[in-house]
Image (cartoon, rainbow, N blue to C red):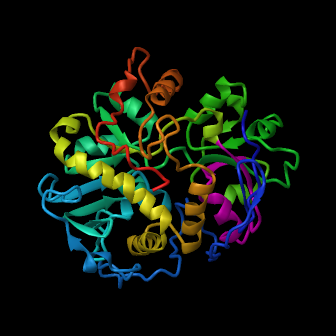
Amino acid sequence: MTRPTLLRPVPSRRSRTGAPRTRAAAPALTIAVALVLALGACSGGGDAAAGDGSGQGGDAGAPLDETAEAAEPGSALDLAEVCPATVVMQQDWQPQAEHGGMYELVGSDYEVDNDIKAVRGTLVAQGTDTGVQIEVRSGGPNVGFQRVSDLMYLDTDILIGAVNTDQAIGADADGRPVVALASQLTLSPQIYMWDPATYPDATTIADVAATGATIVTGGELIPSLLAGQGIVSMDQIDTSYEGTPQRFVTDPSIVQQGFGTNEPFVYENEIPQWDKPVAFQYLHELGYSIYPEPITVRAADVTEQADCLARLVPILQRSQLDFLADPERTNALIVDLVEQYQTSWTYTDGVGAFSVAAQVEDGLVSDDPASGVFGQIDGDRVAETVATFVPVLQETGSLAADAAVDPEDLYTNEFIDPSITMAD
């Protein structure tokens, strides 16, 4: 049974039982026509201290690396003796708070590489200089929309990638296997959203779809999943979604994809042509069971980089929790990077704060329900995802009809620190 979709006026949110839960309002910083997923006109956002445009880092909060003590040699935070001198991490999209666990590790001595839209700096974990550098590369349009799993094989400098489970299935079948080591987001923030004024009686995607509404999305994977459950009909699907708010604003009869950690705030606070709540439902409630953007390596590196990963994976478990507990510095860094990258992407302090609250309050980040350990991968869930998505990927032509994928090849928990939980 799915949870009814809730209207989300800021600052009020609602608990999973529907009881009101109030919190301090996130800053509402208006940006003229920009949507957080916009691929159109470029605009800066936020009050975060930015660099001077020369590629140098700004003052994004407390200068952790300037006060960080060097890790004790041989300790759990000493990466210098076991990891590459620069630990390169590849994200799947532009900088945003959903990637906070990676950006949390970037020290304040960071420099921006605008040629590849990446940030480099001291890798600082729990206030400690680990002895190596970190480089976080943004994805999406900055890499020609190439899949992270493909980039990891094209450029072996990349040690860590953010690879969704459904993408990992395809990579395995294509002979470029990747292995998930830890989850920083437990559930996908993907949503379908609609106008509550147009559909006042709708509380679920099924309710809106039953009216025959057009569903505007970026591909056929999720629609095929929902069609298999009888929730939508494929003749309702329009795959022309290009990331801007224009169509939704001008035609509120449509259903549109988005992130529950993003669009509800942006449409209500940063798009003056809309300036009101949207209604939505999370797709993970309807079988979109993937692990979103887990910490992933090439299959061979599970062995070849084992000594490094034994220390790095627990650091990445902890960095997500550190970010969620105190996100201001890292969100300021994210806003600064977006401003310095000068792409069509926009991001503000307000949406960053909203995202953090949504990740926690909507249960998108949690301890693994099966083990109680933060970041641990549930093998049964991976097996269920493979069983669900292999036929869907085959139906959409994304996977060969004879493809065979072993769920156990897609993940390992051998580097997880079982003592790390959200209660820490």
Residue extending farthest to the bottom is 52
In the image, residue 235 lies at what x, y percent?
70, 30
Name the quadrant containing residue 296: top left
Q: Quadrant of the C terminus?
A: bottom left
Q: How many marks?
A: 0
Q: Quadrant of the N terminus?
A: top right
In this view of the protein, which residue sits in the foreground, 19 or 29?
A: 19
Image position of 396 with respect to 145: above or below: above
**Is 402 displayed left or right of 384 in the figure?**
left
Which residue is found at the position 27% from the left and 44% from the top?
152
- Is residue 95 visible in the rendered structure shown here? no
Residue extending farthest to the top is 402
Image position of 113 with respect to 214: above or below: below
Which residue is found at the position 55% from the left and 59% from the top?
37
Which residue is found at the position 39% from the left and 18% from the top?
403
Taking the magenta stretch, the answer to whether it contains residue 399 is: no
**Is 238 displayed left or right of 421 in the figure?**
right
In the image, residue 341 lies at what x, y percent?
39, 70
User: What range of the chain is rendered magenta?
Assistant: 255-282
Which residue is found at the position 73% from the left and 69% from the top?
273
